[in-house]
Image: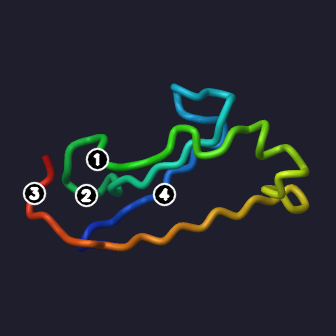
Amino acid sequence: MAGDYKWQIKLCPRGSEMTKDASISMYLALDRSTPFPEGIGYGFPNFVSLDALNDNTKGFLLKDTCIIEAEVLVLGTVSKFP
């Protein structure tokens, strides 16, 4: 919960439609149970390229594991979304 709303971190391991099979995409979006229009959220279609992720010199993977953490800070609230 953040700002009285349920949020989800959506991770697309093979990218979104714009970056299919090129990058990991990651988005912060309202949970589907929250009564707001579809598509309210923010994110990164090119969070990290799959080439960079699999490059051992970059250090993203440790024993085939990549840990992604996120922190959500609520700066203010609005009574209505667009």
**Cα distance in 3D space between marks 4 and 1:** 12 Å
- Seen in the picture, residue 59 relative to 21 is either above or below; the reply is below
Residue pointed to by mark 3: 80
Q: Residue 53's spot in the image, x, y percent?
A: 77, 46
User: Which image quarter: residue 79?
Assistant: bottom left
Q: Who's the residue at 59% across and 45% down the image?
A: 47
**Cα distance in 3D space between marks 4 and 2:** 14 Å
Viewer-proximal residue, 65 or 44?
44
Viewer-proximal residue, 39 or 43?
43
Upstream in the sequence, badge 4 or badge 2?
4
Residue pointed to by mark 2: 34
**Cα distance in 3D space between marks 1 and 3:** 12 Å
Visual colour scheme: rainbow
In this view, the mark in front (1 or 2): 1
Residue pointed to by mark 4: 9
Residue pointed to by mark 1: 40
Q: Secondary structure at mark 3?
A: loop
Q: Residue 6's spot in the image, x, y percent?
A: 33, 66
User: Tag 4: residue type?
Assistant: Ile
Is residue 18 shown left or right of residue 55? left
Viewer-proximal residue, 33 or 39?
39
Upstream in the sequence, badge 1 or badge 3?
1
Q: Residue 15's spot in the image, x, y percent?
A: 60, 35
User: Tag 1: residue type?
Assistant: Ile
Upstream in the sequence, badge 3 or badge 2?
2
Q: Who's the residue at 66% across and 44% down the image?
A: 48
Most distant residue in the left direction = 79
Q: Secondary structure at mark 2?
A: loop
User: Tag 3: residue type?
Assistant: Lys
In this view, the mark in front (4 or 2): 4
User: Which image quarter: residue 73?
Assistant: bottom left
